[in-house]
Image (cartoon, rainbow, N blue to C red):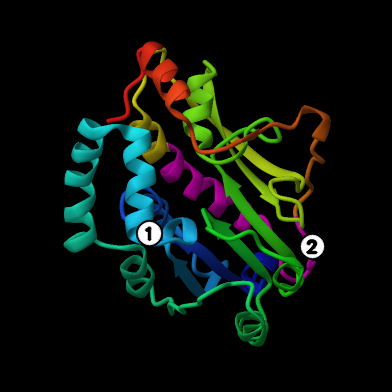
């Protein structure tokens, strides 16, 4: 029997947001390709997108996409929401329990996850910033996946901002989570090529799918017997940027570059 065969599975708890269009593509790939002999997902929490009401999210998205693209997006979102497979479905099909939480930073949730004895917490578009008590729960640490090069593209909508700034690739980043947002050391990256005239939908779907494989590779590299994170590269925060949800001026400039939303 090889040493690898003796290795116990890594115990991972996932925290994400309820997005049937894009984040769901991550989990469609993740649960389909996960090596269950190496990685055991001990639970998942799926929170509301942006941690706000559906109406408030709709208004935010409408301002971003504009009326015509918002209608087109809604025509894709609604069938997925009502009839398509959701993140919860992919998890349950994989035998993973889904646990709800009003806030992942609540004392009750922190104690609950602590009782599961996770080796690792993994954030995939989680709508809350993890605070100290939650970050301290897992034995090995916490990882986040971000669809932008760090520390330049910290913040919201990194795929949009990389297209807006004419980058040649969207850099998907797996990094350690620390108290400061998007400031932990970089564990691994991949470059998703961008086109001169691209489509945000294509980039968001592609980075989520490839990001799932990147995360699987990172998790597979962690030996729970050693109890430590993979080597990481500290961020040079002197190069840090931070981007908010795009405003009308930047949306106009994005379209002027020949890019589309859908």
**Residue 3 picture quarter:** bottom right
Cβ atoms at labels 2 and 1 below 8 Å apart: no
**Residue 228 picture quarter:** bottom right
Q: Main secondary structure of the magenta part?
A: helix
Residue 58, magenta (yes or no): no
Q: Residues within 10 Å of mark 1 (few under 14, many from 20)?
A: few
> Which region shows up in magenta?
207-229
Label 2 vs 1, first from the N-terminus: 1
Residue 227, magenta (yes or no): yes
Q: Is residue 123 positioned above or below 71 on the image?
A: below
Label for residue 32? 1
Residue at 53%, 70% (x, y): give it: 37
> Element under label 1?
helix
Tell me: 85 left or right of 111. left
Residue beneath label 2, please? 228
Q: Position of residue 236 (x, y in %)?
A: 82, 33
> Element under label 2?
loop
Residue at 34%, 26% (x, y): give it: 199
Between 10 and 58, the one lying in front of the other is 58
Q: Position of residue 157 (x, y in %)?
A: 50, 38
Q: Residues within 10 Å of mark 2 (few under 14, many from 20)?
A: some
Tell me: 84 left or right of 257. left
């Amino acid at each position: 029997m090889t040493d690898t065969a003796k290795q116990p599975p890594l115990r991972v708890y996932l925290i994400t947001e309820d997005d049937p269009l894009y984040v769901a593509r991550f989990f469609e790939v993740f649960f389909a390709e996960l090596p269950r002999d190496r990685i055991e997902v001990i639970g998942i929490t799926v929170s509301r997108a942006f941690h706000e009401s559906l109406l408030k999210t709709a208004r935010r998205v409408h301002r971003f996409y504009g009326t015509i693209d918002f209608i087109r997006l809604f025509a894709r979102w609604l069938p997925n929401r009502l009839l398509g497979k959701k993140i919860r479905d992919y998890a349950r099909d994989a035998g993973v329990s889904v646990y709800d939480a009003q806030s992942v930073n609540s004392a009750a949730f922190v104690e609950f996850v602590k009782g599961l004895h996770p080796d690792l917490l993994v954030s995939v578009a989680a709508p809350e910033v993890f605070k100290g008590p939650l970050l301290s729960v897992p034995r090995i640490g916490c990882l986040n996946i971000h669809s932008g090069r760090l520390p330049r593209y910290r913040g919201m909508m990194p795929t949009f901002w990389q297209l807006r700034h004419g980058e040649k690739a969207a850099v998907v980043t797996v990094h350690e989570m620390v108290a400061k947002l998007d400031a932990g050391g970089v564990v691994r990256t991949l470059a998703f090529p961008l086109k001169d005239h691209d489509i945000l939908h294509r980039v968001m779907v592609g980075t989520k799918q490839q990001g799932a494989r990147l995360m699987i590779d990172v998790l597979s590299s962690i030996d729970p017997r050693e109890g430590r994170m993979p080597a990481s590269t500290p961020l040079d925060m002197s190069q840090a940027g931070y981007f908010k949800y795009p405003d009308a001026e930047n949306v106009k400039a994005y379209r002027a570059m020949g890019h589309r939303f859908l």
